[in-house]
Amino acid sequence: MKTVCDVNLCAGCYACTEICPKDAITVIDDTNSLNAVIDEKKCIHCKACEKVCQQIHPIELKQPIAWFQGWCNDDSSRSRSSSGGFAYELMKRFISEGGVVCSCVYNNTHFVYKIASSEVDLEKYRGSKYVKSNPEGIYSEIRSIIDSHRKVLFIGLPCHVAGLKCYLGKYDDELLYTADLICHGSPSQKLLKKFLAEKRVPLDSISNISFRKKSVFRLSYRTNNSEVSIAPQGVRDRFTIGFLKGLFYTKNCYSCRYATQNRVSDITLGDSWGSSLGMEEGRKGISLAICQTEKGIQLLQKSDIKLMDVNIEKAIMANHQLREPSKMTKERDLFFSLIKAGNTINKSIRRCYPKMCFRQSIKAILIKCHLYKQV
């Protein structure tokens, strides 16, 4: 197997697949890792793929010049956001000024990047997506928009921001705005689909998937205008346990070069977990914004959001991804060996974390018997 970059280090940015003039590259997702595999029968050895590979040619990381925390001024919008609503308000303002936005949405059983040019389209961009979104095909679309002299705001994983920049090469810096998300690491979409299939969730009828509500991490989905949680309210489902433990991210995530204080984009967005603004504001959601460029600062200042100073040291302590990547757990090899052997995700996670899963199962029984107060 010939790969573009070192085996199992592919970030799945798809820059190589888009740049290849012979469609000779396929990103293979085996749930454990990603690899950009070259079809040597089609390859003409132009090395275009290597030139845009962020693992071979790392993108420049910029030192932050400003830190903020806060929330959007619209209480309703804030309540519907995972955090304080910064991302939504940035997108809304950007579109109102004639630009377009590109970010991740759930679409027809897949998490993909889509272009939005009207405020009506923005609601589907809300919420955290705790899987590896797929940017395949979007970079060339963004290049066409920039070539037409229209502004683009790209919001995504830092490795996807890097992929976009590597693909574009030289571009008009005044037309492209980028925002990366503070990322724990991300698992393959295949794992999520397998988990939902095991729960007999009708994937083709799902209109949206939610991974958290403010500080409550729990997987739920929307179908036929109703929301269904995988686990009872107050109980953490097994997929969420695996995610929060860092059990099953793709292998490249554990050596992520973007898990650092210096960032790849104009602005970095996340949760202000270390905020000292009080528990009540924390329950409503507080966003963290780190600006690397004046463009990023201007984008924030023009949006309908409340901006406040942030204790940088606390923010870094509460977001370890600003210091280092997630550490590979000792249970990870066991998990993937169990999956490979045909076990369900539910059973495999229970084998990895028996005590934690047992406690959640007991809690579910107590809630069902009205012996435990739901939160």
Image: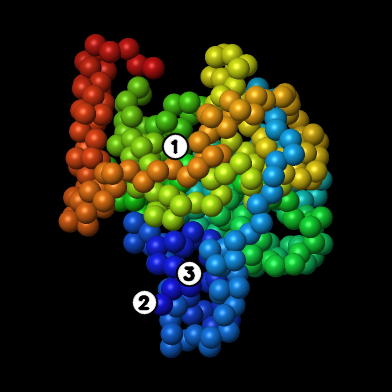
x, y (%) of residue 162?
61, 57
x, y (%) of residue 21?
58, 81
Q: Which mark is residue 1?
A: 2
Where residue 123 sits, quadrant-wise, is: top right
For numbered disc 2, what is the local secondary structure? loop
- Quadrant of the rendering where the N terminus is positioned: bottom left
Identified by mark 2, the residue type is: Met
Q: Residue at x 25, y 21 (%)?
A: 363
For numbered disc 1, what is the local secondary structure? strand
Relative to residue 350, is residue 344 depicted above or below? below
Q: Which mark is residue 67?
A: none
User: As rendered, which of 85 and 349 lies closer to the eye?
Assistant: 349
Q: Residue at x 21, y 37 (%)?
A: 350
Which callout, 1 or 3, points to the residue nearer the camera?
3
Q: Earlier in the sequence, mark 1 or mark 2?
A: 2
Q: Residue at x 57, y 80 (%)?
A: 47
